[in-house]
Image (spheres, rainbow, N blue to C red):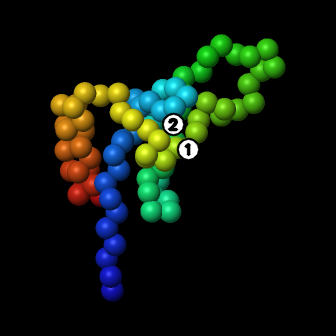
Amino acid sequence: MSASVLPVPKFCYGQIVSFIGGEGIIKNYRFKSGCWEYLVEMPMGPEPQMGRVGYETMIWLSEVDISSLVNNYSEKVLNWKQKNLAKAC
């Protein structure tokens, strides 16, 4: 029997993040192919003339493509909370 350890995700649900192309809120995340991926929802702008198709404001992004919008102190507190959450799971 072997145990596997997942790395702690860098971002958490509800966190505001930025990436090339805009800003958004983390709505979900998953560990896939050796790295964390995050479902980011971007704020909806005005409705286009052709109407909306569906979830065009959500995108899966890799952890390396995202940066946080919090300062260093908030990031340290967030990392501490994430570590405690990971232990609880």
Tell me which amino acid carries mark 1.
Trp
What is the x, y in percent for residue 76?
19, 38
Q: Residue at x 21, y 32 (%)?
A: 72
Of mark 1 and mark 2, the one earlier in the sequence is 2
| C-alpha separation, residue under disc 1 versus residue under disc 2 | 6 Å
Residue 60 tag number? 1
Tell me which amino acid carries mark 2.
Val
Q: Which residue does the numbered mark 2 point to in the structure image?
A: 40
* Crowd tier of the residue under label 2, counting other residues whose Cα lies within 10 Å: few below 14, some 14–19, many 20 or above: many
What is the x, y in percent for residue 32?
49, 59
* Secondary structure beneath label 2: strand
Q: Which of the 4 quarters of the picture holds residue 14?
A: top left
Residue 51 tag number? none
Q: Residue at x 61, y 16 (%)?
A: 45
Q: Which of the 4 quarters of the picture holds residue 52?
A: top right
What is the x, y in percent for residue 77?
19, 37
What is the x, y in percent for residue 71?
25, 27
- Is any atom of residue 27 visible in this view? no
The image quadrant where one finds the N terminus is bottom left
* Secondary structure beneath label 1: strand
Q: Which of the 4 quarters of the picture holds residue 66?
A: top left
